[in-house]
Image: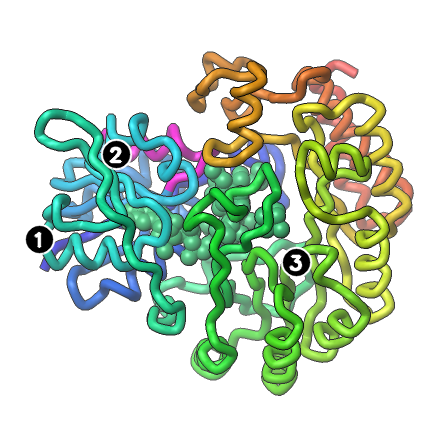
Amino acid sequence: MMRVALVNPPFSKLVYGEEYTIKSITPCLGLFYLQSYCSDLAEIRIFEGESYESMSHLIAAIGKFAPDVLGVTTNTTTWPLCAQIARASEARLKLCGGPYAAFRIEECLVDFDAVFLGDGEVSLRRLLQSGGDLTATPGIAWRDVDGRVSRADPSPLLELDDIPYPDHEAMQLGLYQASPHRELPQPFATMVTTRGCGFRCTFCLSAVGGLNNGRYRERSVANVVGELEVLRLKHGVRSIQFWDDTFTMRKSRTRELCTALSKLDISYVCITRTDKMDSETAELLAMSGCKGVFFGVESGAQAILDGDHEKGVVNQQVVEAVAVCRSAGIQTTASFIFGSIDDTLDTIEESVGFSLELNSDYILYNIYTAHPGTAGYARAIQEGVIDHYCVDLQRWKGEPEGVPTVCKRIPRTQLLRLKAEAYIRFYQQQGSDAHAYIIETYKSELARLGV
Ligand code: B12
Ligand code: SF4
């Protein structure tokens, strides 16, 4: 039997910084789905980078397993580590997939033999069945004997109910930790009940044009409940973090799912759009165990929300969505983006002002990254803000994640400053001692930035 190593590189230090201790480590579901779909064909082991002391420990563990096939999941942040893992491996076939690789084929084919485009289950299965024949594998890009990039026909998209549940046993649930903000009862697990989203937000790879062209697909409620029962009865899981892009996409499904969830005695958190939340939905979520909802608000300046992000939401809907959740007893997190192409000091101040009035329980202020494959990335290139960039800490000095800022009017350091100040303002306004450590973290950040 072939041996396959599937690797998720470590990311928390890259994303949250060395000193930042608040982190949520959750299993890489995409790799666990690949494993469950192909486990009869190969010995597949998953390597979660976060659980190793360092990259060299991770690389040594993969080497010890001596895989025939190495598969690495990529995103913009971790790309340099993905390439490093491939270079260090002696596997006969080196494969990559995930959100970065799908849109950076040529770059990935320097260190990898093939790039998997979109959902990987069917493609990986065909590859393993063929004994590693790339020419017999749908849904990939690879270099042919002349070194030219070839693209196979896309894989058919599976019915999600046809994919076996990920192996929760193998996930070693104890390895992972939910975000401590959430106060979710342990043990917890993560799940996706849908894939894709299909709205048109220009910064997002789940949008039209992104992975699987953003196509929205659902698992049946019965299939979801079956997995929840395994988690509850076999693993004693008491809470779930649903990673669906838009958990409440369809009202009738939300009703059906919440009715089923209410019988399971499980607490959960989920993500959705503000225009997919109303008082009925909030009540349904609350009675079925929902403790928290994450909303991508993006900007409090309507002109930026419409122009840069094409979110398709008006800010009054954001206000109402947060309010109905609060009335139903559900905590909310509002996530904002600073530094989109046309953001200015005024629009960011408008956004911060909006966030302070919104009265959400938690807040996230992020700095915009133009991810390859998004409409925002294409626009940034078209308008000459960036060229076709590589993730490169040398080239983009001072850019923490090695990617360039695309904001036309505000440089990165100033965005970092605005972000730290916004966090301090938000949590000072909340006034609770519980948030003192966040305020201190961002005061240190301001000191580091020389303010
Ligand atoms: C859960 C999640 C997280 C979790 C991570 C959990 C984990 N351990 O992986 C947390 C909260 C930590 C997180 C953090 C971040 N995330 Co995130 N996250 C998601 C989310 C919502 C769901 C991922 C998921 O489970 N999908 C379901 C599985 C089934 O799909 P999949 O992962 O794509 O895998 C399939 C295929 O892509 C393919 N495949 C993937 N890898 C491989 C490898 C091989 C070898 C093969 C054959 C196939 C294959 O096969 C899989 C099965 O079909 C996605 C959005 C989305 N809908 O995908 C964003 C997403 C992946 N995140 C994104 C981003 C930007 C981030 C952050 C950078 C944000 C930040 N600044 O903090 C960080 C970076 C984290 C990191 N790993 O580096 C972007 C990535 C864009 C990009 N090009 O990088 C996404 C796509 C959001 C978006 N819509 O734009 N994230
Ligand atoms: S609604 Fe959310 S998941 Fe869907 S395209 Fe927009 S940002 Fe992405």
Q: Nearer the viewer, mark 3 or mark 2?
A: 3
| Numbered range of the magenta stretch | 74-87
Q: CA distance from mark 3 to mark 1?
A: 41 Å
Q: CA distance from mark 3 to mark 2?
A: 35 Å
Q: Position of residue 208 (x, y in %)?
A: 52, 46
Locate the N terminus and report the quarter of the image it occupies. bottom left
**Do labels 3 and 1 touch, CB within 8 Å?**
no
Looking at marks 3 and 2 on the same chain, the residue that comes earlier in the sequence is marked by: 2
Residue, disc 2: 86
Residue, disc 3: 272
Q: Can residue 7 be seen in this snapshot? A: no
Q: Can residue 411 be seen in this snapshot? A: yes
80 is within the stretch colored magenta: yes
Q: Amino acid at mark 1?
A: Gly
Looking at marks 3 and 1 on the same chain, the residue that comes earlier in the sequence is marked by: 1
* SS label for mark 2: helix
Q: CA distance from mark 1 to mark 2?
A: 20 Å
